[in-house]
Image (cartoon, rainbow, N blue to C red):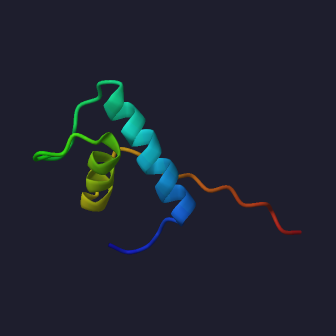
Amino acid sequence: MENKYTKYEIARIIGARALQIAMGAPILTDRGEEKNVIQIAKKEFEEGVLPITVKRFQEKKE
């Protein structure tokens, strides 16, 4: 996996997805025996199946 996200973006993505799973969202991967929502979210992130994007805003340089 190419590292196109910062560690802060990854933490935010996994946290947001873990919250979605905890609130009843469908799991997008085979979770196996895993019951921890954070571990499930990490697995989804590593497999690249998350429906979450990151928008970055940059200031205009004059």
Residue 2 location in percent, x, y?
38, 75
Left or right, residue 3 beside residue 30? right
Q: Quadrant of residue 58?
A: bottom right
Q: Is residue 29 above or below residue 48?
A: above
Q: Residue furthest bottom?
A: 2
Q: Nearer the viewer, residue 51 or 14?
A: 14
Q: Residue furthest right?
A: 62
Left or right, residue 54 beside residue 61? left
Residue 60 location in percent, x, y?
80, 62
Residue 10 location in percent, x, y?
47, 58
Q: Residue at x 24, y 59 (%)?
A: 47
Q: Residue at x 68, y 55 (%)?
A: 57
Residue 45 location in percent, x, y?
32, 55
Q: Residue at x 26, y 55 (%)?
A: 43
Left or right, residue 35 beside residue 30? right
Left or right, residue 15 beside residue 35? right
Q: Residue at x 29, y 24 (%)?
A: 24
Q: Quadrant of residue 6?
A: bottom right
Q: Residue furthest top?
A: 24
Q: How many marks?
A: 0
Which corner quadrant holds the N terminus? Answer: bottom left
Q: Quadrant of residue 18?
A: top left
Which corner quadrant holds the C terminus? Answer: bottom right
